[in-house]
Amino acid sequence: MESLLFRGIILGSIYTLASIGLSLQWGVLRNLNFSHGAAITFGAYIMWSAFNLAHFPYPLAFVLMIIFAFILGIAIEWLTVRPFFGKNDTNIFIGTVALSSILGQVYFLIFGGRQKFLEPMFDGVIKLGSLRATIHEIFTLVITFITLIIIWLVLNKTRIGLSIRAVSQDQVGAVLNGINTRKVYSTTLGVATILAGIAGVLLGPIYYVSPHMGEAPMVKAFIIVILGGLGSLPGTILAAFIVAFVEVFVGISIGVTWAPLSLFIIMVIILVFKPEGLLGVSSRKA
Amino acid sequence: MLTKSSNKMRPVYIVLVILLLLVPLIIRDDYLMHLIIMTCVWGIVATNWNLTLGYGGMFHIAQLTFFAVGGYASGIGAVTFGASPWLGLLIGGAAAMAASLVIGLPSLRVKGIYLILLTYAFHNGVSELVNHFRDYTGGSMGLLVPAFEAGSVSFVTHPSYYYYMVLPLLLFSIISTRLIEKSFIGKALMATRDSEVLASVSGINPYKYKLVTFITAAFISGIAGAFYASYLGVIGPEIFSFSLIVNGLGMIVIGGMGTLFGPIAGSFIITFFMEVFSSLEDFRPILVGAVIILALLYAPNGVVNYLGEMLAKIKSRKLPGQARESGE
């Protein structure tokens, strides 16, 4: 029982990282980015290459991953969001879908279809009472916690963070107050991609790294941001843990193939009866 | 351009249909014939997708779900219940229609990103169902679907028979799109697409017309899916893959969203593009993705319209006085 709870918490924290970026993007762009899954994979592959090919130490590889992810996020914004923003929302969707397929294939060409094992920073297992946890799982909790605190600090204490929040609340008002919205868009995409990349790095040692590893977490991230309410960060965190617990408990008690089905049923019910989500603001401007 | 005046264009259409009917007599190469049949199949899917997406403004990805449901329904009908593939066409269409009711009733009440996500969720949900009931669907191995037969003649050795099956379906898709566009349903749909508030105020019930169009498009796609399964002889979970969504959207975008012939032009371009560059193998999805993004950037109204505009530009340069008229 404790081990199930613990697995739910671990999975929930990874899902939190994977979906908070989407929620931030929704706040700023009123749009979702379908290359988010490719961004998750990107993080895992950069980490793997820096670690296994370039033999960098783990912290350096991690920093490198963050820099590259930020650049990728800016590229995504420049290529598939900026040309269509405010003119044609569906083109943003199609553009990010196309970009995601391009990226998936690029990973395949560079790294091949075979699954790669991303080594965790710390090997080993510790026992806490009756609970057996790998150190990587503890590491996941710590990293998630630190990342969330940093995101909170950035959003509340820095100028760019305040700009992001201002743009989320009112685009026109932000422009009138002299905020460079272009810069806010690309920074948001960059930050979102970093968060996706961290999720990929943490997922790597649990699942294997493959060209399309990010797609399943992306689908779950979509379910999470809808469930939590688009644009609501507390809602997203709450929903990430709900989804993780549902997945773990349904998987154990009814059967593994029922877990994705039950998530999908939850998503349909939420979208039909409460599209604004659990903690979302009731705005149906979409 | 092509939709300017149907009376004037009627002889052109008749000649075009006759030419299309003659295609198997001209082309003797089986492989080329296969490509043309695949173009037709994807043309049907893209045309019906475009009916709901381009004319109806319902941005969804359920069309491929219907295609897959049609294929699987006819496959299960043939393998488990021994139904002939001919009956399978009907089973596929009916199953896709039923699926469109299940998906459409809740989904069409929301719009924008919610509609995309909801249909995406259904797409994945159906894929999970197929994975779950592997006794009937064959799981990841897929199903072997029998080929069409007439009397004792199997269609496998006669690609032209398949062509004569799929061509009417394609023409039917075009005609039904055209009829819906010209009817009150189409007017109501396009009014809703352009401004839902205004349409509602004018006494249009957007939900009703959206649902009717959605179901019509699903029915034809389901038949196409059943045909596809029986034509290829196999249906597997690859039909739910992300790359098919990309290709399908690409056909509509490259051809021109909301135009009658655009999606067919798009499916022709993408199907043959994949073949022309078949030596590049794994680079093809990258090229297709790049072409889609380039089309979005530089020809957002589609290649057909783009060429039309270019033509109009050249014309207007020669005859400045007529520039205003060729703007449509």
Image: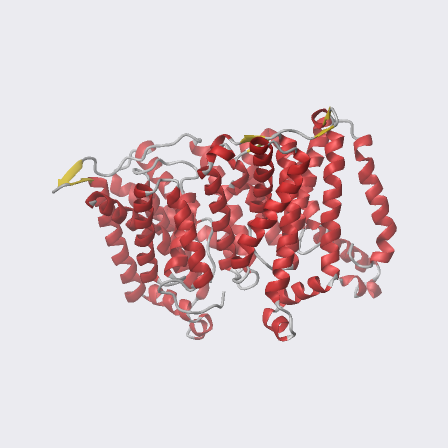
> Is residue B127 in view from this perspective?
yes
- Which residue: 38% across, 54% down? A224
* Quadrant where the image shows the C terminus of chain B: bottom right
How far across and how far down the image is residue B158, in percent?
Answer: 74, 27
Quarter of the image holding residue B310? Answer: bottom right
Q: Is residue A262 left or right of residue A31?
A: left
- Seen from the viewer's position, the closer of residues B35 and A275 is A275
- Seen from the viewer's position, the closer of residues A152 and B163 is B163
- Seen from the viewer's position, the closer of residues A104 and B244 is B244
Q: Is residue B177 left or right of residue B194?
A: right
- Which residue: 61% across, 37% down? B74
Seen in the picture, residue A169 relative to B39 is either above or below; the reply is below
Seen in the picture, residue A175 relative to B139 is either above or below; the reply is below
How far across and how far down the image is residue B57, in percent?
Answer: 61, 60
Residue found at the far front of this picture: B81
> Is residue B269 in view from this perspective?
no
- Which residue: 68% across, 39% down? B39
How far across and how far down the image is residue A11, in percent?
Answer: 29, 46
* Quadrant where the image shows the N terminus of chain B: bottom right
Number of numbered discs: 0
- Which residue: 41% across, 63% down? A27
Residue found at the far left of this picture: A129
- Seen from the viewer's position, the closer of residues B166 and A215 is B166
Quarter of the image holding residue B309? Answer: bottom right
How far across and how far down the image is residue B18, in percent?
Answer: 84, 41
- Which coloring applies here? secondary structure
